[in-house]
Image (tube, grey):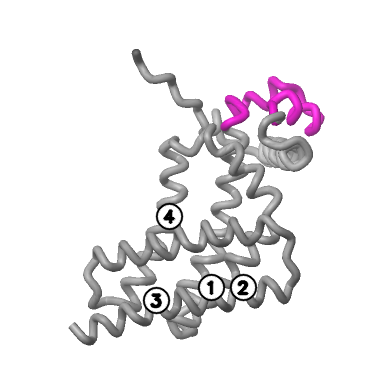
Amino acid sequence: MSKPEKARISLRKQPQQARSADLVATILEAATQVLAQEGAQRFTTARVAEKAGVSIGSLYQYFPNKAAILFRLQSDEWQQTHGLLLDILKDTGQAPLARLRALVHAFVISECEEADMRVALSDAAPLYRDAPEAHEARAKGSRAMMEFLAEILPDCPVKTRELASGLISTTLSSVGKSFSETPRSVDEIQTYADALADMLCGYVASLAIRVEWD
C-alpha cells in the first residue's frame, strides 16, 4: 500500500504587489485569531476566510489548505525566534558564555510570552512537521548553534560539538515548554532562566576544560 501524500504546505504563489501582500497579511492575522480562539482542532480555511473578510477563493490563491496556513504561522514564529537568537550568538562584543546566557534568557522569555500560541501550533504540528520545509526551518537553528560552538570550542571534535548542540537545543525546547505551560511572574522567569543558564554555561565550560586536559 502506498503512503498517503503529504499535505502541501508551501504557498501556491508569492504575493508580488502591495495589495497581494496586504491580503496575505490579513489572512495570517485572521488565522492567528482563529487559532488562538478556537484551537487547532477547530481551525479551518473557511473560518479563517470569514474572519479575514475575504472569499475562500481568495485565500486559496495563496494557501492550498489549512496546513499551509498553520505552517506559515509556525515558520514566521521560528524565523522571529531564530533571528533574535542568531543576533545574540553573533554579538562578538560579548564573551561567548555571556552570549549563551543572554540566549537562554531571551528564549525563556519568548516561550513564556508566546505560550498560548506555541501550544496551539504544537497541536497542529502533525499536519506539517515531516514536510521538507519544516525540517529546513528547524535545521537553521541547529546550524547557528554549531557555528557558535565551533567558535568557542574549536579544538573539540565535531561529534562532541554536535552532541552539545543537540543537548542544548533539546534542553531549551523541552524545559522551556514545560516551564511556560504555567503563567509565570517576571521574578520567576528571571530566576528560572538564571538557573538554566548556569547549567548550560557550566556544561559548555566543562567541554573546554576537558579538551585542555586531554
- Amino acid under disc 3: Tyr
- Residue 107: image quadrant is bottom right
Q: Quadrant of residue 3?
A: top left
Does the segment drawn in magenta span residue 61? yes
Q: Amino acid at mark 2?
A: Tyr
* Element class at badge 1: helix
Q: Which residues are magenta?
A: 43-67
Q: Residues within 10 Å of mark 3 (few under 14, many from 20)?
A: few
Q: Is residue 145 left or right of residue 189?
A: left
Identity of the residue furthest to the top in this view: 1
**Which residue has dot 1 on it?**
196
Amino acid under disc 4: Lys
Q: Residue furthest left?
A: 214
Tag shown at residue 128: none
State the residue position of label 2.
192
> Considering depth in this image, is 89 or 170 the residue closer to the camera?
170
Residue at image x 61%, y 39%? 123
Q: Using the numbered discs, state the Cα–Cα distance from disc 1 to disc 3 in whole angstroms.
A: 11 Å
Dots 1, 2 in contact, CB < 8 A: yes
Upstream in sequence: badge 1 or badge 3: 1
Closer to the eye: label 2 or 4: 2
Q: Residue under circle 4?
A: 140
Q: Secondary structure at mark 3?
A: helix
